[in-house]
Image (cartoon, rainbow, N blue to C red):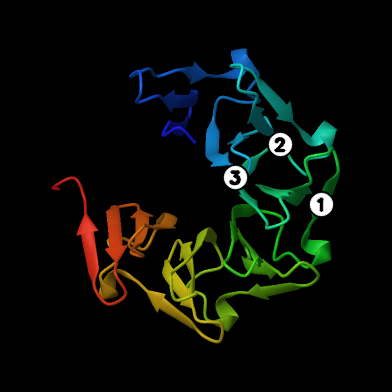
Amino acid sequence: NNADLWFGTDAGVIKYEPANQLWPRYNTNNGIGNNFIYKVFKSQDGTIWAATNGGGVSKFNNNNTWTTYKQSNGLAGNIVRDITQDNSGNLWFATYGNGVSKFNGNNTWTTYTYADGLAGNLVYSAFKDNTNNLWFGTAFGVSKFNGSSWTTYSVTDGLPSNTITSVSQDNNGNIWVGTNAGAGRFNGTVWQTFTTSDGLSDNMIYSITKDLMGKMWFATKNGASGFDGSAWSIYDTTN
């Protein structure tokens, strides 16, 4: 909220404070569940959350300490790959091996798994779209939750792969997924695949995001790719 930048690393969380050029570091000594951080997420009230590899999810308390929630507290699993938040303020945690957890902030946890309609319990990514649908990328396809029911899409529906590493949305409302076999774009009816033959720098995609101008960006195994809706650009070590 004050222009600080947060970084998740394999040695804990690092914050950059541009106002005073300081780099505070936080790790298990400060209360983080595990030093390997998959995701840093800022909730609607400005709270910083860290998803860890085996240590659950940790919340920053603004006094240089962290509160950690684990399976023993109600979290579905201790390997947390991603975090998102719905319009009601509930936090959603994507766990690897145990499905998805919803947390209302008041010690009430709800778990959703394959048995409830999730594509699979190995969940890589979580995303809220502009109509408050929640999307979860799994090792078995991508699932959409509208608050009451689940819809799952897989390769049989047109996905490039069932391994969904990232989910995002463009300014036209299209849902984008990153996979190990290229990117998929969903207009609500059909899926379209984009690969290196279309201009993507590599078919192994780790993350997708949208910039302030509406351009989509893809972090791949071989550099970064940008897509403005019609043309692709590639950036790698030569840039």
Task: Judge left or right: residue 67 versus residue 37.
Answer: right
Mark found first going from the N terminus, 2 or 1: 2
The answer to which image quadrant residue 218 occupies is bottom left
Residue 5 visible in the current orientation:
yes
Looking at the rendered structure, the kind of residue marked 2 is Asn
Residue extending furthest toward the bottom? 189
Which residue shows up at 66% across the image and 39% down it? 79
Q: Are marks 3 and 2 in contact (CB under 8 Å)?
A: no
Percent x, y for residue 95? Answer: 68, 47
Q: Position of residue 38 (x, y in %)?
A: 54, 39
Decide if residue 218 is on the left or right side of residue 99.
Answer: left
Residue that badge 3 annotates: 81
Residue type at mark 3 is Arg
Q: Residue at x 36, y 65 (%)?
A: 214
Of all residues, the one furthest to the top in this rendering is: 29
Amino acid under disc 1: Thr
Q: Residue at x 73, y 64 (%)?
A: 118
Marks 3 and 2 sit apart, C-alpha to C-alpha, by 10 Å
Tag of residue 111: 1
Eye-nearest disc, 2 or 1 = 1
Q: Quick check: marks 1 and 3 in contact, CB under 8 Å? A: no
Residue 52 visible (yes or no): no
Q: Is residue 2 above or below residue 236?
A: above
Picture layout, residue 6 above or below residue 202: above
The picture quadrant where one finds residue 44 is top right
Q: Dot 3 lies on which element? A: strand
Q: Is residue 121 above or below residue 2?
A: below
**Secondary-structure class at tag 2:** loop
Reading the image, the residue beneath label 2 is 78
Give the structural element (helix, strand or loop) at label 1: strand
